[in-house]
Structures are given as C-alpha cells and as structure tokens.
Image: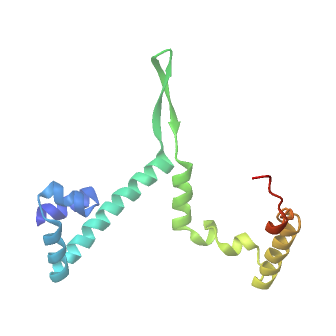
C-alpha cells in the first residue's frame, strides 16, 4: 500500500490514488479503518497534498505568472498576472479577524428584533403595492342561460 500512499500525496484524491497505484478503494478504506499507522500515514499524505495546493495558491496570488501577449498572431511579449481572488481567500484564511465577511458585518450591529421589524415593514410595503387578483366577472346562473331553438 506504499504506492497508494505516495499516489495519494500526489493526487489528493482516493479514487485517483487507487487508479495510479492499482489498489482497491475497498481494501484501502478497510485497512485505514483497522490500521492506525496506515490511517496516520494516510492523513499525513493528504496534508502533504494540501500543502502543495497552498503553495500553488500562494504562487498564484503573490508571485503571479507570465501570460503571453500576441499581436497579429505573433508573440510580442508577456504580462504578469496575479490572482486577486486567491489573495482574498488566503487573507480570509490566515487573518479571519480582519478579513472575514460575517453576518454581523452585514447587519451592522442591528438586533434581531430590529431586523425582523425591518423585514416585516418591507414585506408589508411590497404587498401593499401589489394589486390583488382581478375581480371575477359574475357568471350567469345555469338556469337563466337561454338556449337556442332545438
């Protein structure tokens, strides 16, 4: 199962690691459930993969990458690109007290009663401006319907 664990560190996915190593998913999970050393190694290899992902995210956010620039079908240079979204996610993960978005920020300190009142008032205002269903036209009584000659 050494090949499986090595593949797990590279692939980061149990199914892919099984395909790469020729191991059975069922066998891998059974061993993980009964062998604490194997389980610990499994978790370390998953962490290794997560570290690789984090390093790549950092590279994209901080170092960026060169994207080629073409003009009339010919490469004329390159431009350095960065992932602002990746940088944002990393800041939220590493400094959540400063960069997280929270419900508390969104409601700006309002109490639940104040929010409920605001929602209730908004719903009343919305329903007051919506016309009701059109009035039904009176239907003739079936006994009063005149029938034509037979």
Q: Could you say which is closer to the camera, residue 20 or residue 125?
A: 125
Which residue extends farthest bottom?
A: 113
Which percent across, then down, holds residue 142?
A: 79, 67
- Quadrant housing residue 145: bottom right
Name the residue located 11 percent from the left edge and 58 percent from the top edge.
22
Q: How is the image coloured?
A: rainbow
Q: Could you say which is closer to the camera, residue 90 or residue 147?
A: 147
Left or right: residue 137 compared with residue 20: right
Which residue extends farthest top?
A: 72
Name the residue located 17 percent from the left edge and 56 percent from the top edge.
19
Indicate whether 131 appears above or below 116. Answer: above
Indicate whether 72 appears above or below 122. Answer: above
Which percent across, then down, holds residue 103?
A: 67, 73
Left or right: residue 14 compared with residue 79: left
Left or right: residue 107 compared with residue 37: right
Which percent across, then down, holds residue 116?
A: 78, 80
- Quadrant housing residue 106: bottom right
Name the residue located 29 percent from the left edge and 66 percent from the top edge.
46
Name the residue located 23 percent from the left edge and 61 percent from the top edge.
15
Q: Could you say which is closer to the camera, residue 83 or residue 12?
A: 12
- How many marks on residues? 0
Quarter the N terminus occupies: bottom left
Indicate whether 39 appears above or below 146. Answer: below
Which percent across, then down, holds residue 53?
A: 37, 57
């Amino acid at each position: 199962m050494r090949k499986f664990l090595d593949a797990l560190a590279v692939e980061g996915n149990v199914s892919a690691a099984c395909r790469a190593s020729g191991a059975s998913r069922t066998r891998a999970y059974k061993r993980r459930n009964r062998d604490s050393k194997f389980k610990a190694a499994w978790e370390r290899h998953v962490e290794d993969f997560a570290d690789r992902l984090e390093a790549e995210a950092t590279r994209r956010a901080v170092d960026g990458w060169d994207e080629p620039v073409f003009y009339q079908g010919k490469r004329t240079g390159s431009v350095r690109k960065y992932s602002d979204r990746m940088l944002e996610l990393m800041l939220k993960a590493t400094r959540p007290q400063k960069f997280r978005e929270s419900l508390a920020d969104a409601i700006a300190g309002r109490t639940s009663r104040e929010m409920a009142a605001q929602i209730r008032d908004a719903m009343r205002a919305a329903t007051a401006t919506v016309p009701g269903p059109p009035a039904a036209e009176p239907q003739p009584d079936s006994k009063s319907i005149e029938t034509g000659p037979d």
